[in-house]
Image (tube, rainbow, N blue to C red):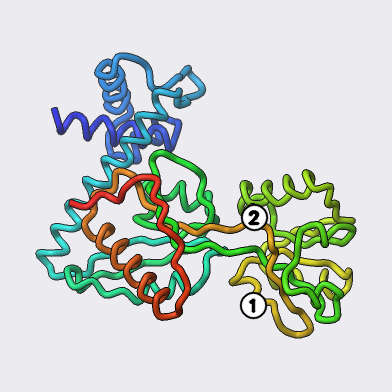
């Protein structure tokens, strides 16, 4: 029965990805009639249809999406079990796939990469960068083991531990009147051109900025959208604009006549989390999270500033 379950899951995942029986059959290396029979057997086993199809189209229904989502995780864990065993027998490296948000403080990434785990001396971290919503999706789909993610979307299937908190920064010309302020309130930015990241990069954070501006009646004269902080230069220099940047962006842009000030709005603080799957049972992930939090705590004590209280929406599972 276990073999049948794995066969069902592999077939359903392939059909969900291809939405075509011929291509899905080719993907898993069976004939189309064989794949069709497997899908019928699967649907009989679960007691209903997972795919809606006719002669021209195939699509997942809600039950199918729920099945395939869990099936992907099961197949992933099955593959990793074999990979882990082979790695130990061959004395090979153990690889963790870790993502990071472009908004995250580079210090957090450097700290994570500097960790040495005595129980896993050959651990190697493969690092990638994506937007926060994409990182959450990759964690849930099994593409990532862990991520340093700023303001991740809420999900009961994610475990998140807060590791940092900080404000937006406002970039402006050095001779701007706002440069004489120690910190900037949102109201001070009324009647100015704004430069801000494109909404697709982080819809919840973008919407939070715009919602607060609307509530306060703070209106820019125009809005320029950018992808990287450096793109703000011409707008600041030529259009007398002010730019919303995060700490890492502020460090990169604060030169050549540009200065930055913190945005003093508590409701717009950016919170960064270490995120993993809620059902994650990997000992190496649990150990890495613990080591990371210990090192952050050590740095915080040495620098005499409080580490943000760890807010865990679900516990990291330790076996």
Q: Residue at x 39, y 29 (%)?
A: 66
Q: Which residue occupies 55% across, 56% down?
A: 131
For the residue pair 66 and 37, the one nearer the viewer reads as 66
- Kindly indicate the quadrant of the structure image that contains residue 86: bottom left
Residue 302 falls left or right of residue 284:
right
In this rendering, the answer to whether 54 lies above or below 316 is: above
Q: Secondary structure at mark 2?
A: helix
User: Picture quarter containing residue 239?
Assistant: bottom right
Give the number of the disc on residue 203: none
Estimate how packed mark 2 is, as few (under 14), some (14 to 19) or many (20 or more) residues with alpha carbons within 10 Å.
Answer: some
SS label for mark 1: helix
Quarter of the figure with the N terminus? top left
Q: Earlier in the sequence, mark 2 or mark 1?
A: 1
**Residue occupied by mark 2:** 268
Residue 303: x %, y % from top left = 45, 79
Q: Position of residue 296 (x, y in %)?
A: 39, 70
Tell me where residue 237 appears, x and y as whole percent: 84, 75
Question: Residue 112: in sight, yes or no?
Answer: no
Label of residue 252 in the image: 1
Nearer mark to the viewer, of 2 and 1: 2
* Cα gap from disc 2 to disc 1, whole angstroms: 21 Å
286 versus 78 height, above or below: below
Relative height, residue 141 to residue 271 (above, below)? above
Is 28 situated left or right of 248 in this image?
left
């Amino acid at each position: 029965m276990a073999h049948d379950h794995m066969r069902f899951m592999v077939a359903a995942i392939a059909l969900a990805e291809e939405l075509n029986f011929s291509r899905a059959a080719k993907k898993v290396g069976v004939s189309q009639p064989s794949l069709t029979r497997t899908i019928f057997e699967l649907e009989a086993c679960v007691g209903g249809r997972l795919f809606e199809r006719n002669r021209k189209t195939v699509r997942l229904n809600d039950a199918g999406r729920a099945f395939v989502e869990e099936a992907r995780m099961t197949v992933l864990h099955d593959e990793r079990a074999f990979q882990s065993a082979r790695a130990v027998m061959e004395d090979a490296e153990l690889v963790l796939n870790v993502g990071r948000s472009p908004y995250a403080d580079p210090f957090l990434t450097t700290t994570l990469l500097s960790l040495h785990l005595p129980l896993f001396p050959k651990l190697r971290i493969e690092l990638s960068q994506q937007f926060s919503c994409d990182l959450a999706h990759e964690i849930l789909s099994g593409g990532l083991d862990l991520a340093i993610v700023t303001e991740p979307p809420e999900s009961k299937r994610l475990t998140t531990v807060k590791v940092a908190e900080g404000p937006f920064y406002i970039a402006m010309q050095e001779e701007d009147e706002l440069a004489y302020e120690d910190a900037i309130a949102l109201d001070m930015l009324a009647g100015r051109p704004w430069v801000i990241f494109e909404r697709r990069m982080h819809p919840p954070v973008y919407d939070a900025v715009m919602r607060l501006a609307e509530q306060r009646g703070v209106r820019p004269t125009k809005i320029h959208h950018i992808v990287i902080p450096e793109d703000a230069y011409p707008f600041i220099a030529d259009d007398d604009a002010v730019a919303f940047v995060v700490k890492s962006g502020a460090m990169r842009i604060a030169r050549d006549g540009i200065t930055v000030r913190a945005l003093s709005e508590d409701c717009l603080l950016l919170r960064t989390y270490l995120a993993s799957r809620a059902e994650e049972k990997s000992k190496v992930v649990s150990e890495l999270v613990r080591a990371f939090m210990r090192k952050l705590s050590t740095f915080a004590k040495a620098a005499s500033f409080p580490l943000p209280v760890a807010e865990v929406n679900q516990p990291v599972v330790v076996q």
